[in-house]
Amino acid sequence: MRWSVGIETEGDRVLSREEVVELADAVAVSSGIATGIGTSRYGAQLLVQAGTRDEAITKATEEFVRAVATAGLPVYPIVRVEAMSEDEDADEDGDGAG
């Protein structure tokens, strides 16, 4: 099943446009998008294949950590993680059975 996982960190300095663009490039391999220009937070929304929410969060977090290292960003503590399966998304849109 496909999961959309959002991960956000918070640190002690404002990130530049260039830094977040580097993160965006690094998460693009996971159909990801990056956020955080001009704030002390940065994050990403990643798509992963997983059987459970916990597995999706683990996979996305590993990919996020890799992307942060690739982008050369400072390592900040993760302050938010959210995961939504494609089935849950369809239900919220009124397209699912549930």
Image (tube, helix red, strand yellow):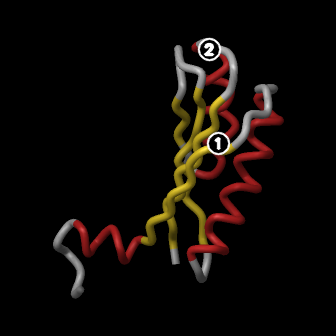
Query: The C terminus appears in which quarter of the rendering?
Result: bottom left
| Horizontal arrangement in the rendering, residue 89 relative to residue 28 (left or right) | left
Residue 2: numbered disc: none
- Residue 23: x and y, percent? 66, 31
**Residue closest to the eye, 49 or 83:** 83
How far apart are the two marked residues, 2 and 1, measured between alpha carbons?
A: 20 Å
Q: Nearer the viewer, mark 2 or mark 1?
A: 2
Quarter of the view holding residue 57: bottom right
Which comes before the other along the chain, label 2 or label 1? Answer: 2
Taking 72 as reference, is 86 left or right? left
Picture coordinates of residue 74, whole percent (x, y): 79, 26
In the rendered view, tell whether residue 36 sits above or below residue 52. Answer: above
Q: Position of residue 70 (x, y in %)?
A: 81, 34
Residue furthest out toward the left:
94
Whether 2 is drawn above or below 52: the answer is above
SS category of the residue bearing label 2: loop
Residue closest to the far bottom: 97
Q: Badge 1 is on which residue?
A: 27
Q: Residue at x 80, y 45 (%)?
A: 66
Residue shown at 58%/38% (left/top)? 43
Circle 2 is placed at which residue position? 14
Task: Tell me the SS state at disc 1.
Answer: helix
At 50% from the left edge and 63% from the top edge, which residue is drawn? 83
